[in-house]
Amino acid sequence: MRWSHVGLNCTDQKTTEEFYSRYFGFARARVVDLGDSQIVFLRKGDAYLELFPAGGPAARQARDDGPQAPGRMRHLAFQTDSVDAFLAEIGDAADVTLGPLDFDDFICGWRTVWVRDPDGVIVEVSQGFEDDDRSHEGSHDKDGA
């Protein structure tokens, strides 16, 4: 099993495509023509975003690091070398909902900001996150390693 994609409902697919292409490096991979609408697939490496036309009214505006209710995605997350450089690049297009915050108490150099995409999805952008080697103690993958 491997990761495939995240499907996003978009008020304006073109605006959402431009946001993820310009600021996160995604590129159009495929368009599925449905006659009166379309589905747009964006790709960056092995990650895909599937952009659907919204089929209803906008949800309540998410805040901070995203919705906390069960059954709702909290946020998308990306890694960068510099949160500050990302914020400088995105400029006025950044609708910051939380941060930037430093998490040096947990991981030296871990810094994160959360922004809202054009459709209200919260997007986390972090630098410096690393796995904790101790978190794998006592766990095994499917081959028992």
Image: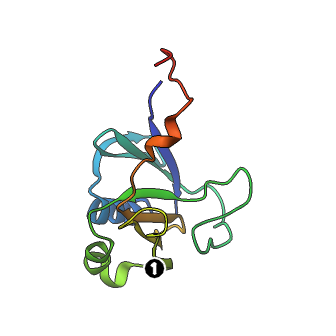
Pointer 1 local density, CA inside 10 Å: few below 14, some 14–19, many at least 20: some
Residue 29, given in percent of the width and then of the height, sits at 29, 42
> Could you tell me if residue 34 is visible in this image?
no
Residue nearest the observer in this picture, 137 or 3: 137
The secondary element bearing badge 1 is classed as loop
Rendered residue at 46%/19% (across/down): 145
The amino acid type found where label 1 is placed reads: Asp
Q: Tell me: residue 36, above or below residue 144.
A: below
Residue 77, given in percent of the width and then of the height, sits at 45, 57
Q: Quadrant of residue 139?
A: top right
* Residue at mark 1: 95
Q: How many marks?
A: 1
Residue 67, given in percent of the width and then of the height, sits at 66, 64
Query: Position of 106 compared to 44: left or right?
Result: right
Residue 39, given in percent of the width and then of the height, sits at 44, 45
Q: Quadrant of residue 46?
A: top left
Q: Tell me: residue 51, above or below residue 47.
A: below
Q: Residue furthest bottom?
A: 92
Rendered residue at 63%/67% (across/down): 58
Rendered residue at 36%/79% (across/down): 93
> Could you tell me if residue 92 is visible in this image?
yes
Residue nearest the observer in this picture, 64 or 105: 105
Q: Residue furthest right?
A: 70
